[in-house]
Amino acid sequence: MNPYVLATLLSSLGLGTTLTFASSHWLLAWMGLEINTLAIVPLMAQHHHPRAVEATTKYFLTQATAAAVILFASTTNAWTTGEWNMTSMSNPTATAMILAALALKIGLAPMHFWVPEVLQGLDLLTGLILSTWQKLAPLALIIQTAQAFDPLLLSALGLTSTLVGGWGGLNQTQLRKVLAYSSIAHMGWMIIVLQYAPQLTLLALLMYVLMTSAAFLTLKFSSATKINTLATIWSKSPMLTTTAALVLLSLGGLPPLTGFMPKWFILQELAKQGLPLTATVMALAALISLYFYLRLCYTMTLTISPNITTSTTPWRTQATQSSLPLALSTVMALSLLPITPAIMMLVI
């Protein structure tokens, strides 16, 4: 892709998200979401592969549907209340519609069906943008309007997403689909605690972005898109295999890795709010997710793929892609748990 076109598209992505962040008016927020969608569509279709074009079409249709519902609901709310402000959401029908549309935007279950299909058709870097940056603007709107939503509906969305995200990823052999279901499960963790402690939602989002970036960049660096490809990575780069396995366990939420911190805080908050059953279901759903991460780790570290030498191969050509972003995101995805006390001071 032409670098000038790429720069324009990436700056439009940034502009759309910033516009949504800064807005308290529904029309402005809608405009930011539309700029965001239109900016990523050419990035998704840049390879002209039938799968990429199919994924782009599916993504565009779902996002356009969600944007239309947001516009319709905000117009309905403005019609009944006389205000376009996000804080004055008093019409229950409009509020429920906006929550459904934003859930569709970020891929919360049961509006999650497009996420694995779309992610499977994209290359890993565009998939990374879709899994991290594209979630920010809709989540910002959900956080801003959280007090207007029905608490039971938010809890139901969160629980369903964590269960579907864990269950759906069990039988996958494609790594991008595994990461898509991982994304759905993490969104559920963010939504479940939103009504009680929005700052924990932001913390979970930050940790999710760090860990998902490390996972996608690792796969990009090793050119792996299927589980059986993972078995051959260790002969090319033993160190990368080790860190990749740890990043996956961090995504699963195992101590003493970074991913344990948001899950710990969220379960603690749910127990504090007198919801032990919800906390138990969430913890069990996290175990289901952990199984498929462990499956990937097993393939990477404990199996030897056929048709390869059993020693490291130093004569391979060196990778030309930059490893600095991968190194930074991996370090943060593995080693932020010791600063938990400082974060507790900030968020609790």
Image (cartoon, rainbow, N blue to C red):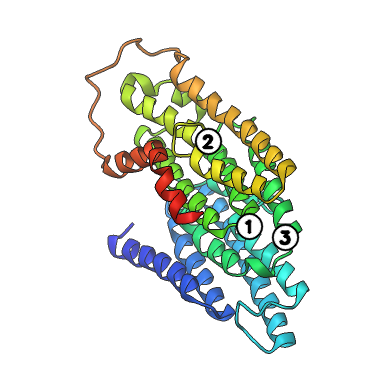
Q: Position of residue 286 (x, y in %)?
A: 62, 36
- Residue lying furthest bottom: 82
Vertical position of residue 24 compared to residue 337: above or below = below
Question: Of residues 237 and 144, which is closer to you in this image?
Answer: 144
| Mark toward the start of the polypeptide (1 vs 3) | 3
Element assignment for label 1: loop
Determine the residue positioned at 56% across, 42% down: 263
Task: Please state which amino acid type lies under the numbered disc 3.
Answer: Pro
Determine the residue positioned at 68% across, 77% down: 89
Q: Position of residue 36 (x, y in %)?
A: 48, 66
Determine the residue positioned at 64% across, 36% down: 283
Question: Of residues 126 and 98, which is closer to you in this image?
Answer: 98
Q: Which residue is mark 2?
A: 253
Element assignment for label 3: helix
Residue 196, disc: 1
Q: Residues within 10 Å of mark 1 (few under 14, many from 20)?
A: some
In this picture, residue 70 sits left or right of residue 123? right
Question: Of residues 196 and 319, which is closer to you in this image?
Answer: 196
Residue 112, disc: none
Task: Please state which amino acid type lies under the numbered disc 2.
Answer: Gly
Q: Which residue is mark 3?
A: 151
